[in-house]
Image (cartoon, rainbow, N blue to C red):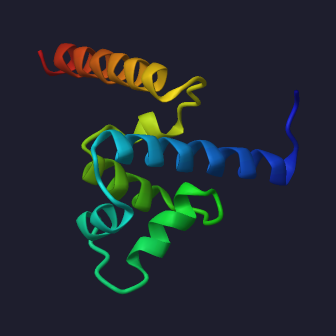
Amino acid sequence: MILKGGDIMKNYLKIVGANIRKIRELRDMSQQQLAIKCGHTSDSARSWISKIESGERSTHTDDIAIIANALDVPPSILYVEFNGNNADFEKRMLAYIESLSKIETRLDA
């Protein structure tokens, strides 16, 4: 299936939002806790994360970096489309993070 224009952006927002939600849940964090860890302390902080996770809100790369840091994952993982149930996602996410760590180790050597 080929996506066009606005559909590409909607798909991207859904992928990023779903990954944030899944990783947040794997970390046993509430939306409020994640928002606070990202530096949002207002009453609308949970709503900010909720809208990002549902794909209703566009996010800047700065926000992606802040959220990834709060979740303790590389920002790039938030852009990867994983299909499957949560157990499958967790296994593939951890494998992906491990492969990135190996690359970083080689680059640092």
Residue 24 location, x and y as percent? 36, 48
Is residue 61 depicted above or below 103 in this figure? Answer: below
Quarter of the image for the N terminus: give it: top right
Is residue 27 depicted above or below 50 in this figure? Answer: above
Quarter of the image for the C terminus: give it: top left
Identified at 49% across, 41% down, the residue is 19
Residue 25 location, x and y as percent? 37, 45
Answer with left or right where residue 38 lies relative to residue 62. left
* 32 or 75, nearer to the observer: 32
Is residue 27 depicted above or below 82 in this figure? Answer: below
What is the quadrant of residue 22 in the picture? top left
* 86 or 15, nearer to the observer: 86
What is the quadrant of residue 4 in the picture? top right
Residue 70 location, x and y as percent? 26, 54
* 31 or 66, nearer to the observer: 31
Identified at 29% across, 53% down, the residue is 29
Q: Residue furthest bottom?
A: 43
Identified at 77% across, 45% down, the residue is 8
Residue 89 location, x and y as percent? 47, 25
**Total marks placed:** 0
Identified at 38% across, 62% down, the residue is 31
Answer with left or right where residue 92 lies relative to residue 57. left
Q: Residue furthest left?
A: 109
